[in-house]
Image (cartoon, coloured by chain):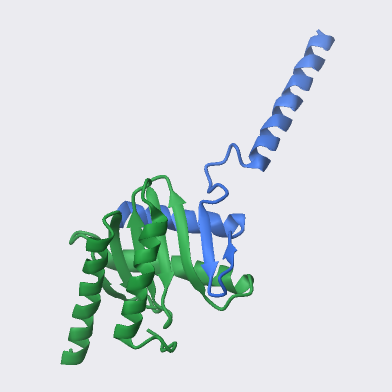
Chain colours: A blue, B green
Amino acid sequence: MKKALGRLALLGAAAGAAYALRSYLGGGSAGPKKGDVQIVLDTGTIVEPGPSEAQELADIARKVLEIGG
Amino acid sequence: MAEGSASAADQVQQALENLRGLSGELDSAALVSEGGELMGSTLAPGVDQERYAAMVRALAGIARRVARENGGAEFAQARIREEGGYVLLVGLGGGGTLAGTTGPDARVGLVLYDMRNTAKELERMLGSEGGRRL
């Protein structure tokens, strides 16, 4: 019984770690992926905003498409 | 409203209609001033234009912030891909923003090319080439 519980705990920990890794790598999130948001500066440099700004831009863009697209 | 400004508004509207006609993949086009005023658009009559303009202003504000954080003074253009399509922005010299939307399969490079040309035309029209604020 003790052994089975130990294995179950181990399995749970492994599943949690896998989920955390997937979330960290962005595979499990519905947020913008690399290349979805691109900004060209007046200097000609092309930049991709950080995750929070990209998310903010994507959220507003979704609404723009909903009402005006 | 003064005759001159009514004529400028008509010219802006005509330029946006021309852009829509030229770039078949563009679903909508709008010109929003830096202060968030909708100066012209090809939006359908039922669309909440004030809300649309506020959202474009918000997008432009974030794009401008990103530009400044990365050593630029302004953003020249921005492309945001979402499930339903693309939102494209082109910054005007005077702080205004030309916004456009397309479907998900649009050739955005071509659309942006047409938008950049229209933005130059709008800058000339509104006298904002030299950075006069819109």
Compared with residue A31, is residue B46 higher up or lower down, i.e. above or below? below
Query: Does residue B62 appear to the left or right of B16 in the view shown?
Result: right
**Depth order, front residue of A5/B41:** B41
- What residue is rendered at 66% in x and 41% in y? A25
**Depth order, front residue of B91/B66:** B91
Q: Quadrant of the C terminus of chain B?
A: bottom left
Q: Is residue B2 visible?
A: no
Q: Which residue in the rendered view is the most extreme toward the right?
A: A3
Q: Quadrant of residue A50?
A: bottom right
Residue B65 location (% of width, % of height): 56, 71
Q: Quadrant of the N terminus of chain B?
A: bottom left
- What residue is rendered at 75% in x and 17% in y? A8
Q: Quadrant of residue B120?
A: bottom left
Query: Does residue A28 appear to the left or right of A66 in the view shown?
Result: right
Residue A7 location (% of width, % of height): 79, 15
- What residue is rendered at 52% in x and 42% in y? A30
> How many numbered markers are drawn?
0
